[in-house]
Image (cartoon, grey):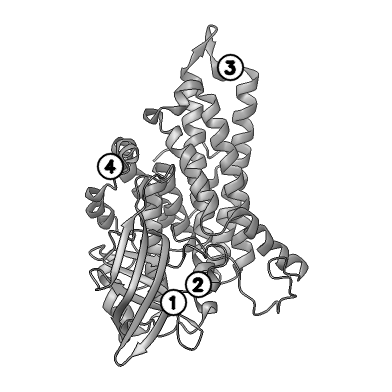
Amino acid sequence: MSRAASDFYALDDLLEPAEIEVRDRVRDFCAREVTPIIGDHWERAEFPHQLIPGIAALGIAGGTVQGYGSAGMSAVAAGLVAAEWARADGSMGTFYGVHSFLAMQSIALLGDEEQRERWLPAMARMETIGAFGLTEPEHGSDAVALSTSARRDGDEYVLSGRKKWIGNGTIADLVLIWARGEDGNVGGYVVPKGSIGWTATRMTGKTALRAVWQAEITLDEVRVPAENKLANCHSFKDVSVVLDRTRYTVAWRALGIAEAAYELALSHTLQREQFGQPIAGYQLVQDKLARMLANLTGMWLVSWRLSKLADEGRMTAAMASMAKMDNCKKARAILADARDLFGGDGILLEHHVARHHADIEAIYTFEGTDHVQALIVGREITGLSAITGRRPARATEKPAEPPQSI
């Protein structure tokens, strides 16, 4: 596949052949199957269920999860895949990210061997779709304070509470519910579809990521077998391990959606003529394009380096927060410029940029808001927590901001 217009510094040369192969495999699928239909689904707020078998056939479910039929990709490859989904459509990126990076990664990291064998192979084949239930109506950035409860009753746990913004929540076959046990610690509980007392209501009225469904979930004394409690999750610090391992992919998603916007804008300005010449020939347009490309190049390099550090086991939560914070801010600006360069056509779904322009607002917010990401970085570089007002124990304290489960 030819080099993308946004690869100004021959960045593909930094990638391994296997990483390029999986990226191009996803890019080709998206060009054939996603881009032609997604605008209509986005407008109608309908999830394209018919794409799931094709996504399963790509063999990419599970991202970096090793074994159990999962893809077992490098962190770089997983990031490139996340970028490709966002490059095609933010909604499909959310569907894939929730299933592969949040749900499957949680089971892989915090489940025991029996639990991994029980759930992950079917999830890798995408015969079982997963979701991740952390955020609550009253607890987003302070999800550590979640109020959903779990109490032991014989061979079962009884779950009660509410969740909000749960991506895949209405279509998932199993949902990881994070709840506070009787000892005050947070645990993970795998709730199967159709459990008595479980109500998942699709959220409507969204102005971003319209083609993926989020749910408000009510748990009214939902009973799950004791063996459905993740064996290696003993506190919120364990949940943070998952969040730390998945947040870097959002930096890639911001990059992917910004790449799409830049390439769409470049193509449009070369074709659109005003006052007798393509508008790409005007100084103001070229200035915008040059600055967009410069930001994209920096975003790519940060994302790649962060993933290399992740592959080496050296990525920290603050590193991931910085990449998410800065990439999303730059992507937001690139999307605004791209929409502007389209003029009136920029608000028509047929040109795709309007959809991306709306979707970046959700990506900018979820998996930790811009401001809290900055405070996580600030805490790391100063040793002082502006979130809690307490001086943290640097070696042990985890990020205060978990992802909104969109």
Tell me the CA gap for discs 4 and 1.
Answer: 38 Å
Which quadrant of the view contains residue 117?
bottom left
Q: Amino acid at mark 4?
A: Glu
Where is mark 2, residue-wise?
146
Give the spatial CA distance, label 4 vs label 2: 39 Å
Sequence-first disc among 4 and 2: 4
Circle 3 packing at 10 Å, graded few (<14), some (14-19), many (20+), is few
Label 3 vs label 1, nearer the camera: 1
Mark 4 secondary-structure assignment: helix
Residue designated by label 1: 179
Quarter of the image containing the C terminus? bottom left
Q: Does any portion of residue 259 appear in the rendered image?
A: yes
In x, y percent, where is residue 324? 58, 55
Question: Label 3 sits on what residue type?
Answer: Gly
Q: Residue at x 50, y 83 (%)?
A: 185
Q: Quick check: marks 4 and 2 in contact, CB under 8 Å?
A: no
The amino acid type of the residue labelled 1 equals: Ala
Marks 4 and 2: which is nearer the front? 2
The mark nearer the N terminus, 4 or 1, is 4
Look at 31% across and 45% down and name the residue there.
Answer: 29
Point out the tag, 3 or 4, that comes first from the N-terminus.
4
User: Which is more foreground, mark 3 or mark 2?
Assistant: 2
Asked whether disc 1 touches disc 2, contact meaning CB atoms under 8 Å apart, the reply is: yes
Q: Which residue is mark 4?
A: 33
- Label 2, secondary structure: give it: loop
